[in-house]
Amino acid sequence: MDKRPSSLKRITNKKAAEAFIRKQVAEIQKQVKDQKVLLALSGGVDSSVVAALLIKAIGDQLVCVHVNHGLLRKGESEQVIEVFRENLGANLIYVDASNIFLKELKGVADPETKRKIIGKVFIDVFAKEAKKLKDIKFLAQGTIYPDILESKGVKAHHNVGGLPKELNFELVEPVKYLYKDEVRVVGEALGLPKNMVYRQPFPGPGLGVRCVGAITKDRLNALREADAIVREEIDKLKDKPWQYFCVIPDFKSTGIKDGKRYMGWAAIIRAINTRDAVTAKSYEIPYKTLYKIRDRIIKEVPGINRVLWDMSDKPVSTIEWE
Ligand code: XMP
């Protein structure tokens, strides 16, 4: 196994982060020289920190590809574009592939099949972009140390390790010996926004595993809006849980509006605390916040007529519904 060097001390403060950045910038420059580097930028902490590090080291020799699979949370793609293209001047290719993903996922209800389709379509879309760009020898990845320890090497959702062999990339993995908390400290030292660096974990298949069963565009849109409300209200709390989001199952229940019965979806709120995501405790959402979320979802999200709170622990309930 690729082991963390013993000379690498824990990065817990700005000074240590800056020393790490200086060293990595020099190493990246030495490795890639005047060549171009490709990076799949999801907007997650790891790929964002790697992108910022590479921009510092090699500027526009870095080509970022942001694939919007249509399963991202509200405002996420917009933030990637704002932070990287507008603020950091990154060479960023934005690919809106949401219709391709929706088409491939149409009618697919089985969670594992959904995950596989999302992973495969992601690789296809990314590889297609990579092939359009000529003369790229290097691929940067946001691999972090726990990925190596779990011997996955790459993130399930990026799965760039599964890219067609003929692309023949040499890897650039500047944060591969860092733990998540260290990556965040480095991200802050690089000037990335706090809400990007400290964002809660988000599964690679995105809202796809929270739009339970076969995904439809209208239910996915309702989920995105309801999820944004859950995040907005819980973000106001001083003591925030580890992960908090919304789920919409694929059944409807009876509601009543203007004296008429109608069928609507249920929005399910989930908030948990955990150390390592292996076990988790349901987070006690204050009632005031719960009611505020309920009122806002019912008022602001068309199609939802019921709000529930999933207060189950893991085990037996996994954090995600699928
Ligand atoms: P579960 O649902 O298994 O989730 O209790 C544990 C943690 O892992 C996240 N998760 C994923 N992350 N790709 C990811 O990158 C995935 O396919 C995936 N599935 C679950 C989940 O959000 C939770 O934090």
Image: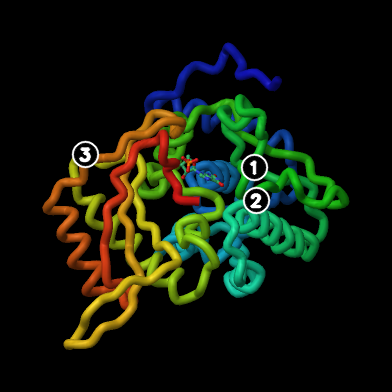
User: Mark 3, residues whose alpha carbon is within 10 Å: few (<14), some, or many (≥20)?
Assistant: few
User: Mark 1, residues whose alpha carbon is within 10 Å: few (<14), some, or many (≥20)?
Assistant: many
Q: Give how far across and how far down residue 259 sits, in percent.
A: 17, 87
Residue at 25%, 76% in the rendered image = 255
> Is the CB atom of the residue marked by disc 3 within 8 angstroms of ligand 1's nearest atom?
no
Q: Give how far across and how far down residue 299 sits, in percent.
A: 21, 74
Along the line of sight, the residue nearer the viewer: 50 or 19 = 50
The kind of secondary structure element at disc 3 is loop
Three-letter amino acid code at disc 1? Answer: Gln
Residue at 36%, 44% in the rendered image = 243
Query: Label 2 to label 3, Cα distance in Å?
Result: 34 Å
Q: Pointer 2: what residue?
A: 39
Residue at 39%, 46% in the rendered image = 199
Name which quarter of the figure residue 263 lies in.
bottom left
Q: Pointer 1: what residue?
A: 141
Q: Give how far across and how far down residue 111 sits, in percent.
A: 57, 54
Along the line of sight, the residue nearer the viewer: 108 or 119 = 108
Residue at 50%, 55% in the rendered image = 209
Query: Label 2 to label 1, Cα distance in Å?
Result: 7 Å
The kind of secondary structure element at disc 2 is strand
Q: Dots 2 and 1: beta carbons under 8 Å? A: yes
Query: Label 1 to label 3, Cα distance in Å?
Result: 32 Å
143 shown above or below 159: above
Looking at the figure, which quarter contains the N terminus?
top right
Three-letter amino acid code at disc 2? Answer: Leu
The kind of secondary structure element at disc 1 is loop
Q: Pointer 3: what residue?
A: 239
Three-letter amino acid code at disc 3? Answer: Asp
